[in-house]
Image (cartoon, grey):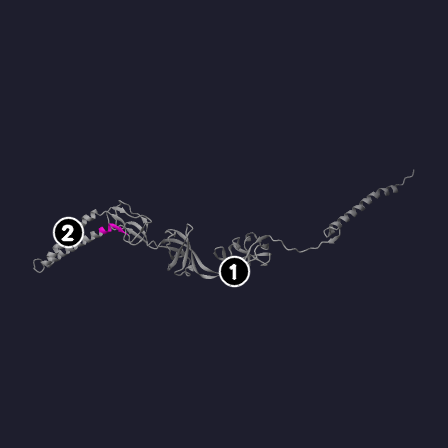
Amino acid sequence: MEHHPHHRQSNNQVPHRSFRFWMIVLLGIAGLVILFGGAIVVNAGGQRKTATNTTSQPSAALTVSSAKAREEQWPESVKASGAIAPWQEAVIGAEINGQRLVAVNVNVGDKVKKGQVLARFNTDTLQAEQAELNANWMKAESDRKRAVELKDSGALSSQEIESFENLAAVAKARLDSKNMQLRYAEVIAPDEGVISSRTATIGSVGNAGAELFRMILKNRLEWRGELTASQLVQMDTKQVVTLNLPDGTVAHAIVRQTSPSLNSNSRMALVYADIEQANDSHAMAGMYADGLIVLRQSTATIIPAQSVVIRDGHSYVFKLQQPGAAITGVRMVSVTTGRHIGSNIEITSGIKVEDEVAVEGAGFLNDGDHVRISNQSGK
């Protein structure tokens, strides 16, 4: 039999070529699908159309309220802190020596009147000494009178007469001194006021000059606020001070005067303000209180304090870029704040009157956000 090797080789190559051909075709189709698939869309009716980029309105990130910056007349003020102290505090002490204290009539906090007896020392010894000195004076005075009557008779020399007169004068002086000690046995209030301290104890023996009581004269208190040099030049008499007391209540005071110089160590000056002693005032000597001193009225650009957001130690507001629109972008603006009264705050730089800012929800915003405005009043 005769062999034909050439024909067997041709039959073996046919399947191999067919496989490569269809692989190339499939890869080409896949490439076309990937290349054009993103640009071909099929609609519900089976028709094809080319997709186009369309611009839509951005969605709002948050719903907020807004307010317009406006002008109001606000009082300018200075903040300071200081102690509340007596206007004048009297030290009442013993004025006699060696006598025992037998009565103490008042205690701390008691209101007293001028001339009221606060305490009393024992007077038994003093009265006995007074009686003796009174007798001595009466005898000396009698001798002096007789000597004067004999002056013209020549029975006594002028020196003897002068001696009798001196003895009478000395006896009278001793009696007056003892009478004064008897008066000092009663400790008297020098003026009306309130007892602020008491060291007097029944049974103790008095020493002249020893402190028995302290008294706030006329129950008059003052606030001594500490001021810097720049604050001091703004002070004037009759300015009103609002004091925030430690218990949360408020007291009022009127500036009386300022210190003529600054403390060389602290570089601070003092302002003295008389505290109005209303019946419900809780101001007490020894308290430390913050004070707000009203200076004058001036124009302030204000917005709700809730609008101001603190970030990284700086103050910002979110200004509406399209005021009046239902949905608008916001821009974060750095601002400088000033006075703060009630729910409003003064803006000294960063925005101007009629600028509209986000209020409720401002703390959740970021620069460039779009927001929906819940109010269209602009208030």
Residue 144 drawn at (x, y percent): 12, 56
Identify the disc placed on residue 251.
Answer: none
Identify the disc placed on residue 136.
Answer: 2
Residue reaching furthest to the right: 1
CB contact under 8 Å: marks 2 and 1: no
Q: Residue at x 82, y 45 (%)?
A: 18
Residue 323 drawn at (x, y percent): 58, 59
Q: Is residue 369 visible?
A: no
**Quadrant occupied by the C terminus:** bottom right
Relative to 147, 98 lies left or right: right
Q: Earlier in the sequence, mark 2 or mark 1?
A: 1
- Crowding at label 2, few (<14), some or many (≥20) Cα neighbours within 10 Å? some
Q: Residue at x 12, y 54 (%)?
A: 142
Residue 76 drawn at (x, y percent): 45, 60
Amino acid type of the residue tagged 2 in the rendering = Asn
Identify the disc placed on residue 70.
Answer: 1
Q: Which residues are magenta?
A: 181-188
What is the distance, in whole Å, between disc 2 and disc 1 at their CAs? Answer: 91 Å
Q: Is residue 182 magenta?
A: yes
Relative to 42, 184 lies left or right: left
Q: Is residue 142 visible?
A: yes
Q: Residue at x 30, y 50 (%)?
A: 213
Numbered label tally: 2
Amino acid type of the residue tagged 1 in the rendering = Arg
Q: Is residue 100 above or below residue 141?
A: above
**Quadrant occupied by the N terminus:** top right
Residue 194 drawn at (x, y percent): 32, 51
- Crowding at label 1, few (<14), some or many (≥20) Cα neighbours within 10 Å? some
Q: Secondary structure at mark 2?
A: helix
